[in-house]
Image (cartoon, helix red, strand yellow):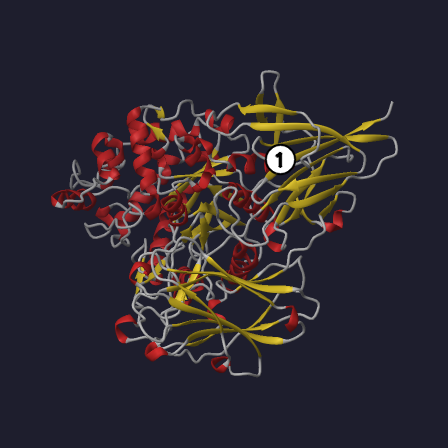
Amino acid sequence: MTARGASFILAALVALPIALGCDRPSRPVEQAPAQIDAPVTLLRAPAGPDEPDLDLHHEWLAARVDQRVDTPRFEWPYRPFSEFVVLNGVGHRALLLLPSLDGEISRVSFKVDVPAESDDELVAAVALVSKFAPESDGVDVGWAIAAADVDPATVPLQRLRLAGGPPDAWREVRVDLAPHRGRTIWIVLASHDAKNRHNDWLLWGDPRVRAKRRAEPVVVDLAAPATLTRRPRAVPWDAATVFKSHALFGADGPYYGRPAWLREAFPWLASLRFLSSLGGNYGPTLAREDAERKTQPDFVPSFEVDIAGRYEFLREFLRDGRGASPGPIEHQFDWHAFDALNASAASAGLDMTFNLAAAPERFTGGTGSYPTYRFNELPVTDESGWKTYVGALVRHLAEQPWYPRAWFSFFSEPNCVWVEQEGAVRKVGFQGDATQYARQYLWTWQAMAPALAGAPISLGPWVVETRRISPAAENLAEYLRALVDAFRAAGEPLPPWRAFSFNLYETPQLTLESFASEKIPVTRQILAAVLGRNDLPIRIEELGIHPLVSAAFEKATAVSLGTTRWEMAWHAEAAAQLLEAGIEQAASWFPVLMIYPPNQSLRAYASYLFASIVVGAVEWAATPDGTLSAVPRAADAATPSEVGIRLGGRHTDRIGVLTASEPGGRIHRLAVWSYPRFATLDGRPAESGAATEQVELALPPRADGAWRVRILAYADQSPLPADADIPVRTLRSAIFGGLPSFGLRELTASDRLRLSVEPGALYLLEADFVASK
């Protein structure tokens, strides 16, 4: 990679917090500054250790709220805090709860049914907001448990005093709920200051009711498939998303070397998805705004303008601005550099999804808007010109030799909104409303369809929000209804969509656990109700941990979140969730981010490698020279017909498993990981009770031999008891020199094997039956 290419990529990565995804913190406009008198939702605590936590942060709207704040702060009532907060190496999402006026107590009360068979506890972390804590004299934190027939506003509180000054760590609140089994209770969280409320910004970090950790080992019985969720074999994580085509590929080839290297580096990859790759990324407005900012003392040039100035092809293949003429649109195309860019990407040998995210300025009223994603966010106003542009573009693409491997999607997150702190709803990305979007989609399809020649298109990517996260952003059904209405009014059948797509991120407001339990069911319900499509496959066009989370973690710890065990476990859990939810394909940002120093040590490489080995998509070997080799498995090789899944997020022990066996059952492969609830530095407990779990593998009993087991993991992990006398062979990655080295252990087992799985650890196991002689 050239220095010029490296500088561009680093600039692009710096821009990722505004470029990736739309899952953003918000509060509902319905929120009032005083007591909220709304129906209270009855929640249910976990009945046992094999049920997920009751996440009170996620259920924040279910609470009864008793709070009075003054007019200057009316925009700061109880709500999810907008930032991901990291203290002493531990990160939490949090609820903001300021004390009330006149020395009164602010309370939020959750009504919870505690099953009779449960053994649960309430756990939360508390702290003051770091920005304001230095000027606070401290605040009282309160909590209580009360019977459901008692007014929660009258319940006495247990208290602790948080001192003012910069917080150095989270303080834990932990309450045993065993005395309340079989009852419905109020769980009350409170803040109070009888004197000086100044800057008492209290955070309740990740409050949740969880089952207590059990002492016995987690048993994974390979001889009893019913103990695991079974799913047909698939590799939904086989795509990578790219920040616009020029982020990896240039007219003379990709910045990192041979295009085929991508497949060698990530042998599970089958497809690339290019964000905003079909125009509308550059225009005269973007250049003018950049020039006007040069007089500001904190001016930082837009990387998009800078690159466009050095690479003419980035001014788009349709002249839009400098060099444009008033002649017919058909005469304004210059395909040479654009074709070279796409041919270079296609030579990687992967399928490609081209995302049409924006329109050149000549079709949006002669101006543009680029505040968020660095593509033009204004709606199309010139129907005739836009249709001419789209038709010419698709006809040209259809002539390219790689076209049979192409998918298309449009537009990017048109329903994304941001709710300001004062309650105003601001559109992020596409600036039109649902009706304007539907009209633009109709025009685009009418121009595209005659030239598409059967190339598949997906509907999206969208933002999928639910009322429990942000009522103001729960608008997917509205946009889809507008789309149906627009096509019906035009007498057009709906397009033959091959998939529905949305973007999925871990954000300061949302964890991975809500994906399969909430977003997927909501999506399927909406598709059935609005489109009448129960059969439409689901794709994820952008998958990852949002830069708002990663940046906060690195700022607080000086450690990249991608180098931590927690993020490695997050990706392992994400791969399992994709498979469990039946997702057709997901395009992670991870492969692209891993290419460039200093990101080569991203531990999630093992997450996708191990999952791909288990499902039979990748073969691995330890070469004599100490290298770990991984290649795509031959297309005609026998592979598992189904995969067993145990999601860590659905169990108190947080142990996740993917397992599959070769036809005939002579070889079993497993990926086993521990998925901590909260992002944390390696070796630092993020929660009380987090400990190394004992996982017992029950191998199918055989009287005619034994199981030869190979255990592969990063060398800084120890899967076996400390006294196990098993040699460890050190292996290095064949591709990424910056990765930690791997450790390979080989041993023999008859029917049982016990692993020690530390928080965030990940292991690959391969058990091969060897018959007795």
Q: Quadrant of the N terminus?
A: top left
Pinpoint residue 644: horizontal percent, then vertical percent: 68, 45
x 75%, y 42%: residue:
222
Horizontal arrangement in the rendering, residue 685 relative to residue 302 (left or right): right
Residue type for callout 1? Ser
Pinpoint residue 378: horizontal percent, then vertical percent: 27, 53
Res 233 seen here: no
Q: Quadrant of the C terminus?
A: top right
User: Is disc 1 surrounded by few (<14), some (14 to 19) or many (20+) residues within 10 Å?
Assistant: some
Would you place residue 124 above or below residue 708 in this image?
A: below
Q: How many marks?
A: 1
Which residue is outermost to the left? 295
x 67%, y 38%: residue:
670
Helix or strand or loop: what does disc 1 sit on? loop
Would you place residue 386 above or below residue 345 in this image?
A: below
Pinpoint residue 663: horizontal percent, then vertical percent: 75, 35
Name the residue nearer the viewer: 205 or 273. 205
Instruction: Please give the residue where the numbered disc 1 appears in the rendered image.
Output: 718
Pinpoint residue 736: horizontal percent, then vertical percent: 48, 26
Res 640 seen here: yes
